[in-house]
């Protein structure tokens, strides 16, 4: 019987996600506003620009990586791989920062 009451109570309990979304809506009322067509367009443009930047860096660094592999410079290979990962992370963070400014603006 105790189990039955618990099951009935859990039916009314909110998930952690639902609770987090409610807290977010209270702390930032603008977050729940729908995006305007202009903002959607700007966000898409930011994605296109940063995809291009990332592709450019990857092409450049992959060329260096291929050259280092051909010359069997293993230390240089590792440095280039780390730089590639770092560049990717940096560009993704820049993109998200810029998109957040558009969303809030």
Image (cartoon, grey):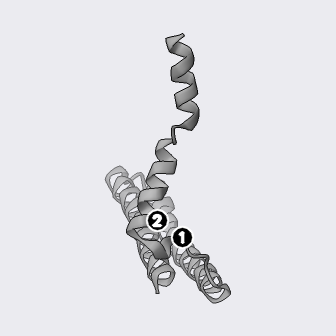
38 versus 79 height, above or below: below
Residue plotted at (49% across, 72% down): 31
Mark 1 surroundings: few (<14), some (14-19) or many (≥20) residues within 10 A: few
| Disc 2 from disc 1: Cα separation | 6 Å
34 versus 86 height, above or below: below
82 versus 56 height, above or below: above
SS at circle 1: helix
Q: Quadrant of the N terminus?
A: top right
**Viewer-proximal residue, 38 or 96?**
38
Q: Where, by quadrant of the figure, is residue 80 drawn? A: bottom left
**Viewer-proximal residue, 57 or 23?**
23
| Residue 95 visible, this angle | no
User: Disc 2 designates what residue?
Assistant: 25
Where residue 34 sits: x, y (%)?
Answer: 61, 76
Q: Which mark is residue 32?
A: 1
Where residue 53 sits: x, y (%)?
Answer: 52, 78
Residue plotted at (52% across, 68% down): 58
Callout 2 touching callout 1 (CB < 8 Å) = yes
Residue plotted at (46% across, 65% down): 25
Where residue 14 sits: x, y (%)?
Answer: 51, 42
Where residue 27 sits: x, y (%)?
Answer: 38, 67
SS at circle 2: helix
Mark 2 surroundings: few (<14), some (14-19) or many (≥20) residues within 10 A: some
Q: Where, by quadrant of the figure, is residue 45 drawn? A: bottom right
**Viewer-proximal residue, 3 or 85?**
3
Q: Which mark is residue 14?
A: none
**Viewer-proximal residue, 97 or 14?**
14
Residue at the top extreme, as displayed: 1
Q: Where, by quadrant of the figure, is residue 41 drawn? A: bottom right
Between discs 2 and 1, the one toward the N terminus:
2
Left or right: residue 37 compared with residue 74? right
Residue at the right extreme, as displayed: 37
């Amino acid at each position: 019987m105790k189990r039955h009451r618990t099951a009935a109570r859990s039916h009314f309990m909110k998930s952690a996600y639902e609770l987090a979304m409610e807290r977010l809506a209270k702390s930032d009322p603008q977050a729940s506003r729908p995006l305007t067509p202009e903002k959607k367009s700007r966000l898409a443009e930011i994605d296109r620009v940063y995809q291009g930047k990332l592709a450019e860096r990857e092409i450049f660094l992959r060329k260096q990586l291929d050259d280092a592999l051909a010359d069997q410079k293993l230390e240089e290979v590792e440095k280039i791989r780390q730089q590639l990962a770092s560049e990717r992370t940096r560009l993704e963070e820049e993109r998200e920062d810029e998109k957040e400014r558009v969303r809030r603006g």
